[in-house]
Image (tube, rainbow, N blue to C red):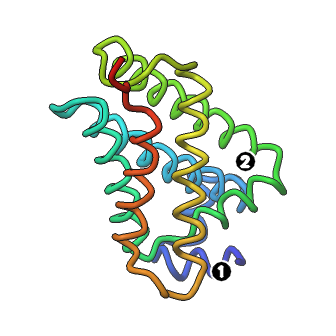
Amino acid sequence: VSMNDIVRESKVSKGGVYWHFKSKDEIILAVFDHFLDVQLEAVEAMLQSEGTASQKLRLIFQGAVAEAEQELPPPLEFYLMAARSPALMQRTSMYLESYRQRIAQLVQRGIDEGEFAPCDASLTALNIISFLEGVVIIGMSVPKQTDFHAQFDNAIDLLLKGLYKRGE
């Protein structure tokens, strides 16, 4: 993407763009930051909603489905961009750590309330994020042989079965 492309798409003068951003790289960082901030805000809203830990995890998975259907750039593109840029990798790592902390708190709440079996909440949160991101990437990348909603419903059901506290 050239600066002229950015100017044309933004409908802002080149001087206006340079007033706010020193370079194309700064624009990319700002777009990246905005995207990640929106993601965390959405997760935070779901975590603040009423319901059990499992209901909130289900909401997070449903949010991922809704987002994937909005034809946003696939998450794989963001991870690939981050892998090529130390600045983007640093931001992605900070985002994933914030995300992991929020999910770990939710898992710990499920454990404390007797809904989930005891486990390492931090490690479990990282695996939940990995599982969710993998389902999104594969679901968006392969030909639509399976209903996307059915794939996500199955994924969250499998995940929750592994977390639920079993009768003693």
The front one of 39 and 126 is: 126
Label 1 packing within 10 angstroms: few (<14), some (14-19), many (20+): few
Q: Look at label 1 and name its amino acid.
A: Asn
C-beta proximity under 8 Å, tags 2 and 1: no
As drawn, the label of residue 155 is none
Q: SS class of the residue under badge 2?
A: helix
Above or below — where is 48 with respect to 37?
above
As drawn, the label of residue 88 is 2
Q: Residue at x 74, y 60 (%)?
A: 81
Label 2 packing within 10 angstroms: few (<14), some (14-19), many (20+): many
Q: Which residue is mark 1?
A: 4
Task: Give the image location of residue 77, x and y in percent.
Answer: 67, 67
Q: Nearer the viewer, mark 2 or mark 1?
A: 2
The front one of 167 and 67 is: 167
Task: Give the image location of residue 152, x and y in percent.
Answer: 40, 62
Q: Quadrant of residue 108?
A: top left
Q: Is residue 65 left or right of residue 83?
A: left
Q: Look at label 2 and name its amino acid.
A: Leu
> Considering the image in quadrants, where does the N terminus appear?
bottom right
> Considering the image in quadrants, where does the C terminus appear?
top left
The residues bearing labels 2 and 1 have C-alpha atoms spaced at a distance of 23 Å
Q: SS class of the residue under badge 1?
A: helix
Above or below — where is 54 with respect to 130?
above
Task: Give the image location of residue 52, x and y in percent.
Answer: 23, 30
Query: Disc 2 or 1, which lies upstream in sequence?
Result: 1
Total marks drawn?
A: 2
Above or below — where is 126 with respect to 137?
above
